[in-house]
Amino acid sequence: MQHIRTQSRRELYSEATRAALLDEATRLFATRGYAGTSLEDVAVASQVTRGAVYHHFDGKQALFRGSPRRAGDPRDRPHHRRRHRR
């Protein structure tokens, strides 16, 4: 008989919190851009504390890298460098 491990309530809550953070961060980055979005904005939109954001992500760049880039605008990337055409 195979043992199937079920997730604890804490693990489920943690996954749900991380998913909410990514969803809200993606929405905010897409509408406000990287520079116009703070971790506080993401925390408030996700209805969690800033501490919860830092529990799941090391900072704004890590959160940005974790979110799907639906907007696709390279100017919203944290270290975007403009190339000058000649």
Image (tube, helix red, strand yellow):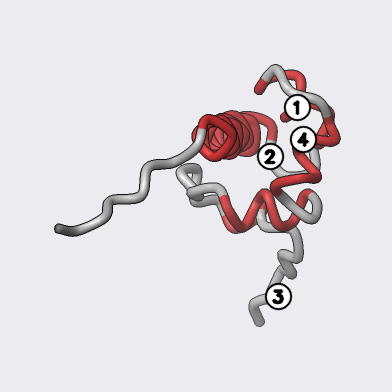
Badge 1, how many Cα within 10 Å: few under 14, some, many 20+?
A: many
Kind of residue at disc 1 = Ala
The label nearer to you, 1 versus 2, is 1
Label 1 secondary element: helix
The label nearer to you, 3 versus 1, is 1
Q: CA distance from mark 2 to mark 3?
A: 22 Å
Kind of residue at disc 2 = Gly
Question: Do residues under tags 4 and 1 come within 8 Å of each other at their CB atoms?
Answer: yes
Label 2 secondary element: loop
To which residue does mark 3 refer? 84
To which residue does mark 1 refer? 43
Label 3 secondary element: loop
- The x and y percentages for residue 77 are 67, 57
Labelled disc at residue 33: 2
Labelled disc at residue 52: 4
Which circle's residue, 3 or 1, is located before the other in the chain? 1
